[in-house]
Amino acid sequence: CEACNEAKGVIQCKSCIRFHGWCKPCAAIVHKYLPFHWLEILAGSCYEDISLGELGFIWFLGHGREPCNPEGQHYS
């Protein structure tokens, strides 16, 4: 993986400008602000389509693209 250098880069993005190879967690993190990109995963000797949702991606629309604060915690 080019982001963490710890796992095999089995995910590539068909929408990004140049070739990248990411592991599943890093592909979701890198695409935090790119939720409409099209990803592929290496399956044997060919690539198959995979969604960001299948990688655990959740698109948060408020709070700076982060989950809501737990009750009782507020931004200062």
Image (cartoon, rainbow, N blue to C red):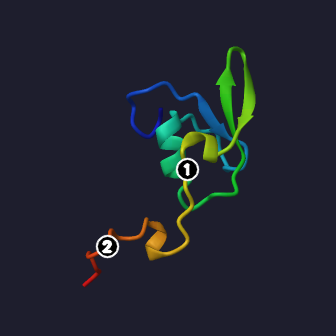
Does 25 sit above or below residue 64? Answer: above
Looking at the rendered image, the quarter that the C terminus falls into is: bottom left
Image side of residue 67 versus residue 56, left or right: left
> Which of pointers 2 and 1 lies earlier in the amino acid sequence?
1
Of 51 and 11, the residue lying toward us = 51
Query: Which residue lies at the image location 51% right of the left edge and 50% below the top edge?
Result: 30
Expressed as whole percent of the image width and height from the top left, the position of residue 65 reads 48, 68
Question: For the view shown, which residue lies furthest in the front direction?
Answer: 71
Considering the numbered disc 1 on the image, is that residue within a helix, a strand or a loop? Answer: loop
Image side of residue 22 versus residue 52, left or right: left
Query: Which residue lies at the image location 47% right of the left edge and 32% below the top edge?
Result: 1
- Number of marks in picture: 2
Q: Residue 51: which quarter of the image?
A: top right
Q: Residue 71: which quarter of the image?
A: bottom left
Select label 2 or label 1 by which is in front.
2
Crowdedness of circle 2 by 10 Å Cα count: few (<14), some, many (20+)?
few
Separation of disc 2 and disc 1 at Cα?
23 Å
Query: Which residue lies at the image location 53% right of the left edge and 65% below the top edge?
Result: 60
Image side of residue 48 versus residue 6, left or right: right
Q: Tell me which amino acid carries mark 1.
A: Phe
Of 35 and 3, the residue lying toward us = 35
Does 24 sit above or below residue 63? Answer: above
Expressed as whole percent of the image width and height from the top left, the position of residue 37 reads 69, 52
Q: Which residue is mark 1?
A: 57
Q: Residue 74: which quarter of the image?
A: bottom left
Q: Tell me which amino acid carries mark 2.
A: Glu
Query: Which residue lies at the image location 72% right of the left edge and 47% below the top edge?
Result: 38
Residue 71 got which mark? Answer: 2
Does 64 sit above or below residue 29? Answer: below
Crowdedness of circle 1 by 10 Å Cα count: few (<14), some, many (20+)?
some
Expressed as whole percent of the image width and height from the top left, the position of residue 24 reads 52, 36
